[in-house]
Image: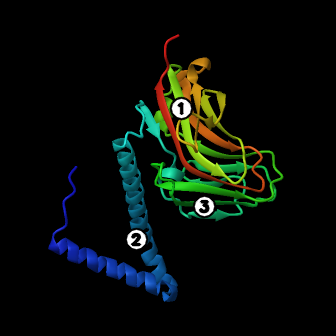
């Protein structure tokens, strides 16, 4: 699809519309309730569309740049979850409790009663990362037994998983003190949920990148009943630590016949 460039009339109308919305934003603090109720739906609709466009454009442009540099390995399927590919609203969450949603399909789980956890999304500053965003977790006192970030795979990708597939996960992360991070792939098919766990460990790539792999051929899964799949990023002993995840990518490739 070729996007038509705006002509003079469109440009003038666009500028006029921006001025109107800017004036409305400046006056929102003094508007009466009836005016706010009338303006709010249109503002939400425009904001959602603009945020979706920005997130999609930024993610695709970053992936295109990485592909041009040869940073993207060949694969059947490649997916970067929302915290690293789309803007979070809000971009920072303090006192994150169990079940806190960061984005659609992305949820923080833990069993710590203190909830002294802060999550913050910012622009990626890691030169080797092709992700537009990075996610930081700051954990103070932690009296729980687990802290994990669960991310739902896209429905189509989950239903397409077969025993002939290998799933690779790669991440770039840094922490104030050494910690172990695990990736767990969960597959729901019928009444069963299969769980595959892999410690994210350094490979032969540049420092800061860790990875793991899941061999679906070793699992007793029923493709006809595949309903959903999600991945958990599990942080071991997270108390009094800060970790920054600069990127997280899942890829799928065919499993070699043995």
Q: Is residue 138 above or below residue 237?
A: below
Q: Is residue 37 left or right of residue 11?
A: right
- Which element carries disc 1, helix, strand or loop? strand
Bin the neighbour count of mark 1 within 10 Å (Cα to Cα): few under 14, some 14-19, many 20 and up.
Answer: some
Which residue carries the number 1 mark?
Answer: 168
Looking at this view, name the residue that lies furthest to the top: 258
Asked whether the beta carbons under mark 1 and mark 3 sit within 8 Å of each other, the answer is no
Which of the pair 189/144 is nearer the observer?
144
Q: CA distance from mark 2 to mark 1?
A: 42 Å
Task: Measure how far apart labels 1 and 3 are at the Cα level.
Answer: 26 Å
Ranked by sequence position, the earlier of labels 2 and 3 is 2
Residue 37 point in image, percent of width and height: 48, 77
User: Which disc, if any, is residue 42?
Assistant: 2
Mark 2 and mark 1 residues within 8 Å of each other at the beta carbon:
no
Q: Residues within 10 Å of mark 3 (few under 14, many from 20)?
A: some
Write the residue at 51% across / 86% down. 29
- 3D distance between C-alphas at marks 2 and 3: 28 Å
Q: Which residue is mark 3?
A: 120
Secondary structure beneath dot 3 equals strand
Q: Residue at x 36, y 43 (%)?
A: 69
Task: Pick out the residue farthest to the bottom.
Answer: 30
Q: Secondary structure at mark 2?
A: helix
- Of the numbered discs 2 and 1, the one sitting upstream in the chain is 2
The residue mark sitting in front, 2 or 1, is: 1
């Amino acid at each position: 699809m070729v996007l038509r460039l705006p002509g003079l009339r469109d440009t003038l109308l666009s500028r006029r519309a921006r001025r109107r919305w800017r004036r409305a934003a400046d006056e929102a603090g003094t508007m009466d309730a009836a005016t706010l109720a009338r303006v709010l739906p249109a503002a939400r609709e425009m904001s959602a569309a603009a945020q979706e466009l920005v997130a999609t454009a930024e993610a695709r442009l970053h992936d295109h740049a990485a592909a041009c540099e040869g940073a993207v390995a060949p694969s059947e399927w490649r997916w970067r979850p929302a915290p690293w590919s789309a803007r979070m609203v809000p971009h920072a969450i303090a006192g994150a409790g169990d079940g806190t949603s960061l984005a659609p399909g992305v949820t923080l789980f833990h069993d710590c009663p203190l909830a002294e956890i802060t999550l913050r999304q910012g622009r990626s500053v890691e030169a080797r990362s092709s992700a537009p965003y990075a996610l930081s977790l700051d954990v103070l006192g932690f009296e729980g037994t687990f802290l994990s970030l669960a991310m739902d795979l896209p429905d189509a990708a989950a239903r397409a998983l077969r025993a002939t597939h290998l799933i690779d996960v790669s991440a770039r992360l840094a922490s104030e003190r050494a910690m172990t991070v695990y990736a767990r792939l969960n597959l729901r098919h019928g009444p069963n949920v299969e769980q595959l766990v892999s410690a994210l460990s350094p490979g032969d790539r540049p420092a800061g990148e860790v990875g793991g792999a899941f061999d679906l051929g070793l699992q007793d899964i029923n493709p006809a009943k595949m309903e959903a799949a999600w991945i958990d990023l599990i942080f071991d002993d997270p108390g009094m630590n800060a970790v920054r995840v600069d990127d997280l990518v899942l890829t799928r490739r065919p499993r070699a016949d043995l």
